[in-house]
Image (cartoon, rainbow, N blue to C red):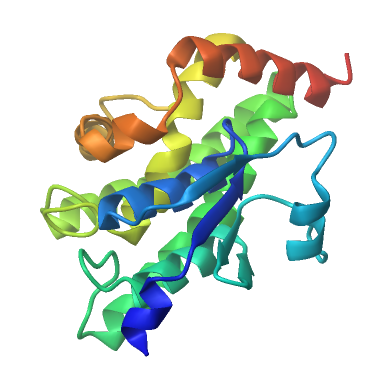
Amino acid sequence: MEQALKSQTVKLHGHWASSYSHRVQLALHLKGVKYEYIEEDLENKSPSLLSCNPVYKKVPVLVHGDCPIAESLVILKYVDEVWKANPIMPVDDPYERAMISFWCHFVDDKLGKSFGDVLSSSGEGQAEAIEEFGKNLMYLEQKLAENGTQFFGGEKIGMLDIVIGCGTYWLAAFEELLGVKLIDPNLFPHFIAWKQRFIEVEQVKEVIPPAAKLMGYAKKIYKNILGA
């Protein structure tokens, strides 16, 4: 039964600039899963995407055989359960799996929101948003220091590394675009070192788009945020 499940076709609806799509791509690459990638036009979404994710109508959506799975965190857990080689979650420790899930939600719900607040504010409001972003990031800095490992997942990339790492490349782009400093190397030495190790992993290089292309898209996003 398990082998039959693995042998079914795998398709991924995504977008080249979506960090959420990149999460799923990276997990599939780390596990050596072959898949068909379907690039979506987010301004003219395909009928296939809309039928696979009628609730949120967003990428990414993984289609395994005839079964669509939406939302990146849900997909990552599914991928890890179906393709057990090269696990991205702790195998024999339910508590550790729960903690990884907690921090993944923290990244999306707290860290991501505070980053969005930086982009959508200016002046004193932006200064406060940057301070809040720094406070949230410090939790991850301290976790790395406490772990004493190369990655959040230990000595190799795990689920939390994927969730955080597939968004960090936007930090440099928006720092340049906004003319602000979001990550002080003196305050976040462990995070900076982790980020460098992450981007040097071969499978990460296969997924993350070129910096110049990202910068062009970042300018478009920021223009939309400002309503210009």
Task: Point out residue 186 in the picture as x, y percentages from the top left corner.
Answer: 25, 26
* Furthest residue in direction bottom, as rendered: 1
Q: Where is residue 94 drawn, in percent x and y?
A: 30, 87
**Which percent across, then down, holds residue 39?**
63, 37
Residue plotted at (16% across, 53% down): 156
Residue 56 drawn above or below residue 112: below
Q: Residue at x 83, y 33 (%)?
A: 43
Which quadrant holds the N terminus? bottom left
Residue 182 seen in this snapshot: no
Residue at (70, 24) in percent of width and height: 124
Please state, as top left, top right, bottom left or bottom right, where the C terminus lies in the image: top right
Asked if residue 122 is positioned above or below residue 51 in the image, the reply reads above
Q: Which of the 4 image quarters holds residue 74?
A: bottom right
Residue at the image position 29 percent from the left and 46 percent from the top: 141
Q: Position of residue 10 (x, y in %)?
A: 49, 60
* Occupied quadrant, residue 115: top right
Of residue 95 and residue 49, the one placed in the foreground of this image is 49
Residue sitting nearer the eye, 219 or 201: 201
In-image side of 166 versus 198 (left or right): right
Residue 222 in the figure: left or right of residue 174? right
| 133 or 159: nearer the viewer | 159
| Residue 7 visible in the shown view | yes
Quadrant of the image occupied by residue 214: top right
